[in-house]
Image: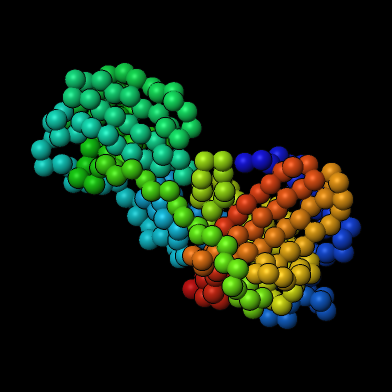
């Protein structure tokens, strides 16, 4: 990603103030009349899965909470031999594919093919129901569902993770389609989409008419007036190196795309999903 967010956060806070955007406060006549209070509070906790859950849920766009699993598989493969476990295994670590290839001759290679061509190589073998790499005690459990690396809590399967698809901007939407509360589920990175929970991204958005409340660590629960045109809602302030802009679009997969750019060539792209009142209340 092209962002140095420490600088961006300070710049956004300053420009929001200069542009007349204000903090959302009780009793403020310009606040949304039916908007939720405490927009930011609880969002990260509500959508943060465990590492093991994340591995099996992040490979497809989600518009609702994943069903918690968090359980170490208990059933072993019916026949546990070097031949039955040899081959390619895949895991998804923060949205990035990790590949482990076990050769029948007792050698292995592992790495992140999407990041670089660098690979870790060594030897492997079976010890009971565990695959031991280079005589490392932190081995992988072999289970019917796949492999489970106990240390970091990572699950491997035979299927290569499919990149998440958040869809393309839908130019046919109207201003009314943006209304409601939205919370971040994906962050756009240089190699694809990563789960927001894995990266600690907690931005949320509340839209009522042209009033938009930007919440979370970056925006600090700030309210601004956006303009709607050609299927997008936009806001901007400042000039040159101090310029900052925020653009909201809706995709053909039902997600909101938030793009923030600054004059310092920093860019942040987030995908958010719509939330209803029951989710906000934790019901």
Q: Is residue 52 visible?
A: no
**How far across and down, in percent of the image, does residue 118 sit?**
44, 23
Q: Is residue 28 left or right of residue 257?
A: right
94 or 76, nearer to the observer: 94
- At x 33% / y 39%, what residue is drawn? 90
Say above or below: 185 vs 123: below
- At x 66% / y 55%, what residue is drawn? 259
Say above or below: 226 vs 79: below
Q: Is residue 21 left or right of residue 172?
A: right
Q: Is residue 28 visible?
A: yes
Q: Residue furthest left?
A: 79
- At x 48% / y 43%, what residue is drawn? 94
Q: Is residue 111 left or right of residue 211?
A: left
User: Split into 4 quadrants, where in the image is the N terminus?
Assistant: top right
The image quarter containing residue 144 is top left
- At x 50% / y 59%, what residue is drawn? 167
The image quarter containing residue 5 is top right
């Amino acid at each position: 990603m092209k962002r140095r967010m420490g600088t961006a956060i300070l710049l956004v806070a300053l420009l929001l103030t200069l542009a007349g955007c204000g903090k959302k406060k009780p009793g403020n006549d310009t606040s949304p009349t039916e908007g939720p209070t405490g927009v930011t509070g609880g969002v990260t906790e509500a959508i943060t899965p465990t590492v093991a859950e994340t591995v099996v849920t992040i490979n497809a766009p989600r518009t609702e909470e994943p069903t918690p699993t968090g359980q170490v598989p208990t059933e072993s493969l019916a026949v546990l031999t070097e031949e039955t476990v040899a081959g390619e295994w895949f895991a998804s670590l923060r949205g990035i594919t990790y590949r482990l290839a076990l050769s029948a001759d007792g050698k292995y290679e592992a790495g992140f093919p999407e990041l670089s061509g660098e690979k870790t190589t060594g030897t492997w073998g079976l010890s009971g129901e565990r695959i031991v790499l280079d005589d490392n005690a932190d081995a992988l459990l072999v289970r019917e569902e796949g492999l489970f690396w106990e240390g970091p809590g990572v699950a491997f399967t035979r299927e290569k993770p499919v990149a998440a698809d958040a869809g393309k901007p839908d130019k046919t939407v109207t201003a009314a389609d943006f209304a409601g509360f939205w919370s971040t589920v994906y962050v756009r990175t240089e190699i694809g989409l990563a789960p927001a929970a894995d990266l600690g991204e907690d931005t949320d958005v509340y839209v009522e008419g042209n009033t938009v409340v930007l919440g979370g660590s970056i925006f600090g629960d700030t309210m601004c007036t956006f303009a709607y045109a050609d299927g997008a809602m936009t806001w901007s302030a400042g000039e040159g190196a101090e310029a900052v802009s925020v653009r909201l679009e809706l995709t053909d997969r039902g997600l909101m795309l938030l793009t923030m750019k600054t004059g310092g060539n920093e860019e942040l792209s987030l995908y958010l999903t719509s939330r209803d009142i029951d989710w906000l209340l934790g019901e």
